[in-house]
Image: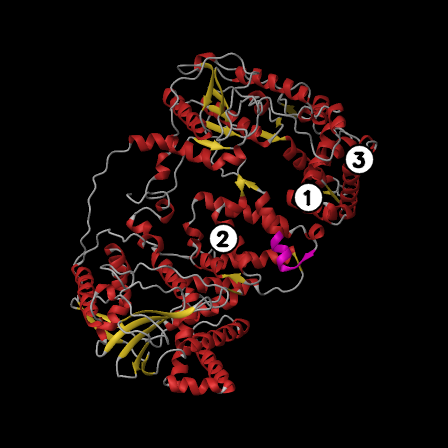
Amino acid sequence: MLEAADAGRTVLAPNAELANALLDAIERAQRDAGRAWWPTPRVRDFGGWLKERHLQRQFTDSTLPRCLSDVEERELWRHVVLASESAHSMLEPAGAARAARRARRAMAEYGIPLQAIAAHGTEETTALLEWSTRFAQRCRDLGCIGSDQLLADLAGRGRDGHDAGTLCWIESPEWRPVARRWLGAHAGAPLEPCSADAPRAPPGAGAHLLKAHSADAELAAMAHWAQRGLRDRADFRAWICVPDLAQRRDALIDAFDAVLAPQRFALEAAEYSAPYAVAGGTPLADFAPVRAALALLSAASGPLPFERFSALLRAPELQSSAAEAGAAARLDVALRSRAPSAAPLAQWLEQSVQLSRAGAAPGAAAPVAAVVRLQAALQALTQLRGTQRMSRWVPAWLSAFEAAPWSLRHRWSSTEYQAAERFRELLGMLATADAVLGGHSQTSAQSIVRRAAGDTPFQVQTGVAPIWVSGERMDPWLAYDGIWLGGADADGWPPPPDPIALLPVRLQRDFGVTEAAVSTRLEAARDLQRRWQARASRCVFSCADAPDHHASLSPLLPKLPLLEGVPPQPHWRAQFDAAPVLESFFDEQAPPFDAGESTRGVGTLRAQSHCAFKGFAHTRLKAEVLERPVPGFNERERGEMLHDALHHVWSVLGDSTGLAECRRDAPRLAALLNEGALIAIEKLCRRRDPGGRWRERERLRLTELLANWLNIESERPPFAVVELEQRSETAVHGGLEFRVRIDRIDRLGDGARVLIDYKSGAALPDWRGERPDNPQLPVYALRRPTALVGVAYAKVNAAECGFVAEVEREAVFRARGTRSKLEGRASFADLLGAWSQRVEALAGQFAAGRAVLDPTPRACQTCHLQGLCRIPSILDLATLSDDD
C-alpha cells in the first residue's frame, strides 16, 4: 500500500470508514520512516471515487448527466413514492422511499436485473418496479444520474485507458459482486490485508471471552481494557466493534469519557481531547449551531407556543454575556404572567419589547439583546413570501442565522464551527437543487432542510484516534494491537437473516446477498472471526445481559479463556464507591431579618408555618414557581376576576336587603352580574388578553357562578357589607410589617361582624393548629378584632359553593347552622388570643432567621423547593412509611 501511494496510485476501499483508517495508517508510516514530506496519499472509498471520477469525465464530455447529491436523491425518491397511487395504502410512505432506494442500490450492487424481479409479480416487486421506473424517468428528464448507477455508466461507456495502472484496491468481504468484478478487471489483484505482529502484543495478550452482567458494564469493561492498553504501550492502537452503536452511542461516550477523558466531567466545561473516536457520526441536526438554526426557522412559521419561545429567548447562542442571559431570563419571567399560550413570533417579540421598555428607567428603552437579534432574524425571514425555489430560501435563512443564532460564532468551539460549516455546505447543495426540488412554500422548504439535517451524519474531524469504535462488523484490514467485538451473544452472532425489503428473498439468495440467508450469514461470520483473530494478537469477544434477558456467549465463538481484571461494576459505580466521605455542615440559621428587607404578606407566614426553610427561601431568596401560560385564563386569573366581580356586585347591592330586591327583578340581576363579569374581565385583559373567544367563555362561566353564589348568600340572616377589598393595610407581628388586603367584612343585625375571604378553588379550615397550613384568616382577624365573632372562606366554584367558617354563633352563614368548636376555646375572643400567640411565634422565628428543615406532614406534597432543600421529592415520599 505504501508503494502504491508513493507511486501516485489511487487506493480504493469499500467504505469511507476503512478509507480513513488506511489514509491515517499511510501518514503514520511515513512519519515513522522519518520523512519530512511525501506525496499526498490518494485513498478513496469506492462510492466517493465514482462520483469524483464522473465529475472529471464531465470536464471532457458535456453530454454526461449530472450526479445527484445525497439530499437530492433522498428527496427525489420521496417525491416518487409519495406521488404514486400505492403510497395511499402504506403506513409510512417515507420509510417506503428509503426501502426503495436501498433495494435499487442492491440491484445495482448485486447485478439483479429488472426482468428477474418482474418475474415474481408480488405486490412489493410491482411497487418497486413502478417506483424504480418513475425514478429513472425523472432522472432522464432532469439530465441526472443516481449514485447507484455511476459504476454501470462508467462500464457502459468503455475504458478510455485513464485507469490503467493508476488503481489498486484492498481485499475485503465488504465488496459487492459487481464492484469486485469490475475492480478485478480494471485494477488487477487486490492488496492483501495485514496480520498481527506478535512482538507488539501487550501483556496478557491472546483471545478472550467476556460476559457482562449489563450493557453498561460491557461498555465500562471496553473502556478499562483500552486504558490498560494505552498504559502498557504509548503507541497502542485498538479497533472496537459495538454492533448497536447507533442506539448506545451516548452511553458509550459517557463510559469511555469516564475512563479515558474524565476532564469532561469537571465543573468547568471546556474543550477536551480523548484518545478514542466513534465512527458514523451523529445527525447534523443534533449539534448546537444547527439545532439553534432549525429552531429559529420553526419559530418563524405559524403560531409559536410559549414553551418554545421561552427556550428560543433564553438560548445560549443568543446571549453574549451573563448579563444578557440574566435579562432574557427576567423577561421570560415577566412574560409568563402576561403572555398568551401561543402567538406568532412577531407578536412575541413586540410584547417582549413593550415589557422591556416598561421595566426600563423613565425615558429610556432597554430592549433585551436576544430580542433585538431575533427581530433582525425575523426581518430577514419575512422578506420572502409564497412559493420560492430553494436558491432563494437559502440566502434568506443564512441572513437570519447570521443575525441571531450565529451572530456570536466567535465563541464557538471547534466542534460547533465544523458542524455549522457542514450545515452551510448542506444548504449550498439545496440551493443548487432547484431543478430537482422545484418551488416550495416556507413550511415545505423548512421540512426539506430539517429532513436533510436529520438524515446527514456528521463526524467531527479529529483524525483517527488510537482507539477506534465502529458500529460495523467488518474486517478492519490493518493490524491492531487489540480488537474487541461486542454483541457476540447466541442471539446476535452470527446475525440473523436481514433480507432487503421489497426484493424477493429467494432472488436475493440466488444473487448472493449475504444478509438474506442463514447459511451465508454463518459462513460470513466464520470468515470474519478468522480475520479478526488474524488482525490482532489480543482479541476479546463479549456479550451482556439485558434487563429482561439472560445472555449467553455464541457457540460459534472458539473455546477461549475468560478475560480477567474486568471491573465488577460500571464506571460510575466504581467512582461512587471510591468517592471520599464529604464533611457535612448544617447551616440552619439565617441572618436576622434586616430593616432593608420586606416580607411577602401573609405568604411569608404561610411558608414559615409549612417549613422554616421554605419561609426563608420563599421570602428572602425569592424562590418562586415559574408560571406557565395556558390557553385562556389560568386559575390565579380566574380567582382575581372572581374577586373583582364580587367587589362590583356588592358595591351595588350593599346588603342582604339589596340582594333580596335584586333577586326579585331577574333582568336587573342578570344585567348586574353581566356587568360585574365584564368589568373584571376587562381589568385583567389590560395585563394579559387571551382573545375574544376566551373572554366570552369566561363571561358566561363567571355570570353563572355569581348567580349560584348569590343563592347561597340569600339564605343568610340579615347582614350588611361594611368593607370591601379596596386597599392594602399593614399588620405588625414579631416586629415585622406584613401587607394584607381583606376581601370583605359584614355587619350582622346586632352589630357583630364577620370577616370573609373569597376562594375560587378548594377550601378547608386550614387555619387550625399550632402550625396552620394557612394563617391568613387569623392574621386578618387580628388586624380587625373589633366586634368580630367569626371568620370564613367563601368557597365560590362550579363544583360546590358554600362557607367554611370558624364562628361562635349558630346560623351566621346559613338559615340553620351550628356553632363551630373554636379549637376548644370558650369564645371567639379566646381563639383570637391563641391565634395571636401562634402568629407572633411564626413571625418571631422568621425575623430571627430560623431556616431549619422541619416540614409539616403535607408540606412537601405542594412544595417546589426539593432541588434547593434536597429533601426527598413527593415521588420518593410515596414509598416512605409514616415513621420515615
Judging depth in this view, the residue of 474 and 717 nearest the camera is: 717
Residue at which label 3 appears:
122
Task: Tell me the amino acid under the disc marked 2.
Answer: Ala
Q: Which mark is residue 73?
A: 1
Q: Residue at x 39, y 86 (%)?
A: 657
| Element type where label 1 sits in the image | helix
Seen in the picture, residue 625 relative to 505 is either above or below; the reply is: below
Which quadrant is home to the C terminus? top left
Q: Is residue 795 visible?
A: no
Among the 4 quarters of the image, the one containing residue 637: bottom left
Residue 589, position as x, y percentages in the image? 18, 53
Q: Quadrant of residue 384?
A: bottom right
> SS of the residue at dot 3?
loop
Residue 130: image location, x then y, percent = 79, 42
From this view, report whether residue 809 is shown above or below residue 103: below
- Nearer to the camera, 662 or 73: 662
Dot 3 or dot 1, earlier in sequence:
1
For the point 47% across and 70% down, the residue is 350
Q: Nearer the viewer, residue 421 or 876?
A: 876
* Distance in Å between CA atoms under marks 3 and 1: 26 Å
- Cα separation, mark 3 vs mark 2, equals 46 Å
Q: Residue at x 51, y 11 (%)?
A: 559
Q: In the rendered view, would you say 520 is above or below 870? A: above
Q: Position of residue 624 (x, y in %)?
A: 33, 60
Residue 485, horizontal then vertical, whole percent: 51, 23
Residue 729 magenta-highlighted: no
Find the magenta span and give its range.
439-447
Which sits earlier in the primary sequence, circle 3 or circle 2?
3
| Relative side of 774 to 19, left or right | left
Q: Residues within 10 Å of mark 1 (few under 14, many from 20)?
A: some
Residue 292 marker: 2
Tell me: residue 627, above or below residue 499. Answer: below
